[in-house]
Image (cartoon, coloured by chain):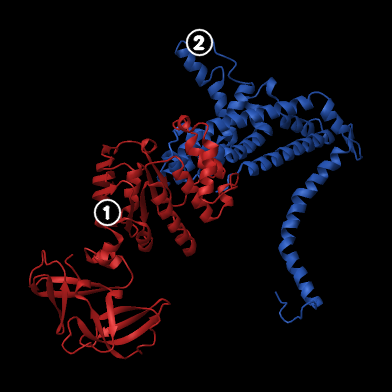
Chain colours: A blue, B red
């Protein structure tokens, strides 16, 4: 700051200019980034969503017709709701699968090294391609898949079961498998904050393991569950790869519909409108989750 | 008096290190007993063994004669007050205090009285109206009082304290020491306290056990510990103004021992001659406040335990003045003399004077 030589209240114009320059220097790059990657794309999206298309020709306009279509015309609203259901189930299953592992890592692994190893093992599948992992489930759940062949060989079934694959069950299973690491890490990050001496104090006062879990550990881990839930929900909600590989006619996702509208039907206005609706829903969900995370966060 | 806690050859090892090494101790019922030691002395581990938070590798722990070595902490009639208070962060002050009253194990005993008890104990620790506050909204001193109320409310026979005042500033610490001592008198419970702060231990305890390297060196009243340490370590660890000299026993004569300090200096101590032998090398310990600084020896004949010194430096400490002096016959030997009251300026640096010590205040240490 070069304000030294100036008397109070008599800052010279040069100092003010200098300050403005400094401000631009620090704020410029992030503002530019924000403009190019956020404002412009959203602007384009809004521009298309408000227009209309006729025989592959786009006409700009200001009509809410596309949004009305999303709300009223089949199958858009239904598919959005279904995608939300798949996302919700993915979030629930991931949390249920992730919690015991995160709990084990936080409270039963005492050496830092073992903990780091587990941490890496949890993340390891994430280094493999998403496609490969989704495809792997196809080879497990298919009519000639590992599961059916095993059951046949054991004589438990006579004909291959078809309900393992190409439905919402296989979708949720695959998505849960793929996104669980995110849930593990968010829950673990929260459980790690539980101070050891607090657990000892509770034990000293006569609390049973169940009481310690219900009254202390679970309440403290709520924000981690919420954070993990939001991540896995969002990822499941917007998924289209698992839908294409292991999904069936009952599990068409909204992202797949947008892809078709944009790439096949060339109905960019409707695709953009759906995109904006989804973004709006996601923003509402994220702020709600954010609010709840803050509300439930236990300050230590 | 019956014994609240008896430790018999209590031992705890971590890896290869023996942290608590065959400790034996009797804690009288209703007493305020402190474990005093530097960090790593095993005092906290001993406390945690008593609480049941650690499993002993050897020895027994008895509670009023009954073996509780393998009893889990929840079934021991004691509560621990933790170093960082360990308040449950997700619960309010009232819920924290009531926690131990509402558990499956304790519910029946306190049913219908929880609210009244919480109010009573909050009032007792001067936290009226803090019911709904969360721990993070409290100051260190307030948290501490919540922890105290939480430890006392279930009416345990023994309350264990793991350096609970360590994180407080000096004024608050003194206030809390007074408060703890008052509560101890009021409740008549056995308090077992761990601290590295000797003044704190002195201020509150009936009995102090000084620990080093997993062993108890001395168990005695604060006064005995201060004026009659049984070894060099205790003598130096306890109190600030210590003088520890090396000498050799010249002669034993009834209840008095004459020691040769080298450089032609001799000192006489009136203490037990038990276990002492002529020619033995011993440590001689005296508290700085038991040394007297005089300009001239009272009379030429009365030169017993009177040593000529030169004043090196004086430090005014408010209520007292510390003189750092060295023996004129042996300039390498330095003593610290603590003089009460505003007598600063009686001597100037470089002055020659005499240091006198009563033979009863000189303590011979063989270890």
Residue A66: assigned label: none
**Position of B229 compared to A131: left or right?**
left
Residue matched to label 1: B214
Q: Chain of mark 2?
A: A
Q: Chain of mark 1?
A: B
Could you say which quadrant of the image residue A65 lies in? top right
B163 versus A146 height, above or below: below
A79 versus B120 height, above or below: above
Between B54 and A111, the one nearer to me in the picture: B54
Q: Residues within 10 Å of mark 2 (few under 14, many from 20)?
A: few
Between A174 and B325, the one nearer to me in the picture: B325
Residue at left offset 35%, top offset 41% = B52
x%, y% of residue A236?
A: 65, 32
Quadrant in the picture for the C terminus of chain B? bottom left
- View extreme (top): residue: A158
Q: Is residue B252 visible?
A: yes
| Front: mark 2 or 1 | 1
B208 versus B235 height, above or below: above
Could you say which quadrant of the image residue B69 lies in? top left
**Position of A49 compared to B67: left or right?**
right
Same-chain status of marks 2 and 1: no
Residue at left offset 32%, top offset 55% = B206
Residue at left offset 63%, top offset 38% = A231
Between B7 and A221, the one nearer to me in the picture: B7
Q: Is residue A128 visible?
A: no
x%, y% of residue B317?
A: 41, 77
Residue matched to label 2: A157
Q: Given contact means CB atoms under 8 Å apart, are the residues at marks 2 and 1 in contact? A: no
For label 2, the SS is loop
x%, y% of residue B277?
A: 8, 69
Residue at left offset 54%, top offset 13% = A160
Q: Residues within 10 Å of mark 1 (few under 14, many from 20)?
A: many
């Amino acid at each position: 700051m070069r304000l030294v030589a100036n008397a109070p209240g008599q800052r010279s114009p040069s100092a003010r200019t200098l300050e403005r320059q400094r401000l631009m220097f620090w704020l410029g790059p992030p503002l530019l980034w924000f403009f190019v990657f956020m404002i412009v794309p959203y602007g384009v999206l809004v521009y298309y969503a408000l227009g209309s298309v006729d025989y592959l020709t786009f006409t700009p306009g200001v009509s809410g017709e596309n949004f009305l279509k999303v709300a009223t015309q089949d199958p858009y609203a239904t598919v959005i709701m279904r995608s939300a259901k798949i996302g919700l189930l993915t979030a629930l299953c991931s949390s249920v699968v992730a919690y015991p592992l995160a709990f084990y890592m936080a409270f039963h692994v005492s050496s830092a090294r073992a903990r780091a190893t587990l941490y890496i093992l949890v993340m390891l599948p994430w280094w493999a391609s998403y496609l490969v992992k989704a495809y792997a489930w196809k080879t497990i759940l298919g009519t000639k898949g590992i599961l059916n062949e095993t059951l046949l060989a054991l004589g438990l079934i006579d004909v291959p079961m078809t309900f393992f694959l190409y439905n919402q069950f296989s979708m949720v299973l695959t998505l849960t498998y793929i996104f669980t690491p995110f849930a593990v890490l968010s829950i673990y990050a929260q459980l790690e904050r539980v101070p050891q001496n607090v657990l000892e104090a509770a034990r000293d006062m006569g609390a049973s393991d169940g009481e310690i879990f219900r009254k202390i550990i679970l309440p403290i881990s709520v924000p981690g569950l919420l954070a993990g839930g939001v991540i896995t929900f969002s990822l499941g909600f917007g998924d289209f790869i698992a839908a294409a590989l292991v999904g069936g006619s009952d599990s068409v996702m909204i992202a797949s519909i947008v892809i078709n509208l944009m790439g096949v039907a060339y109905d960019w206005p409707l695709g953009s409108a759906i995109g904006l609706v989804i973004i709006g829903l996601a923003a509402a969900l994220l702020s709600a989750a954010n609010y709840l995370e803050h509300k439930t966060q236990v300050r230590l | 008096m019956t014994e609240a806690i008896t430790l018999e050859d209590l031992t705890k090892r971590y890896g290869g290190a023996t942290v608590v090494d065959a400790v034996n101790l009797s804690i009288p019922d209703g007493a305020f007993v402190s474990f005093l030691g530097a960090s790593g002395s095993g005092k906290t581990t001993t406390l945690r063994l008593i609480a049941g938070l650690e499993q002993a590798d050897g020895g027994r722990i008895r509670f009023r004669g009954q073996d509780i070595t393998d009893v889990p902490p929840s079934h021991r009639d004691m509560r621990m007050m933790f170093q960082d208070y360990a308040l449950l962060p997700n619960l309010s002050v009232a819920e924290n205090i009531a926690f131990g009253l509402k558990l499956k194990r304790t519910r029946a005993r306190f049913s219908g009285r929880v609210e009244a008890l919480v109010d009573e104990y909050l009032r007792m620790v001067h936290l009226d109206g803090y019911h709904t506050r969360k721990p993070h909204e409290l100051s260190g001193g307030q948290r501490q009082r919540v922890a105290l109320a939480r430890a006392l409310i279930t009416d345990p026979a023994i309350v264990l304290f793991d350096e609970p005042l360590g994180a407080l500033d000096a004024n608050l610490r003194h206030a809390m020491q007074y408060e703890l001592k008052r509560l101890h008198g009021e409740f008549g419970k056995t308090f077992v306290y761990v601290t590295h702060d000797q003044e704190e231990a002195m201020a509150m305890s009936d009995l102090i056990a000084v620990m080093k390297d997993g062993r108890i060196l001395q168990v005695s009243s604060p006064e005995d510990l201060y004026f009659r340490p049984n070894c060099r370590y205790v003598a130096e660890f306890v109190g600030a103004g210590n003088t520890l000299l090396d000498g050799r026993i010249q002669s034993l004569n009834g209840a008095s021992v004459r020691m040769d300090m080298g450089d032609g200096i001799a000192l006489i101590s009136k203490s037990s001659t038990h276990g002492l032998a002529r020619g033995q090398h011993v440590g001689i310990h005296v508290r700085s406040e038991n040394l007297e600084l005089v300009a001239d020896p009272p009379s030429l004949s009365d030169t017993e335990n009177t040593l000529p010194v030169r004043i090196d430096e004086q430090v005014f400490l408010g209520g007292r003045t510390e003189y750092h002096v060295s023996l004129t016959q042996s300039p390498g030997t330095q003593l610290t003399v603590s003089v009460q009251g505003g007598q600063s300026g009686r001597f100037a640096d470089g002055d020659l004077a005499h240091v006198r010590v009563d033979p009863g205040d000189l303590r011979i240490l063989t270890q």
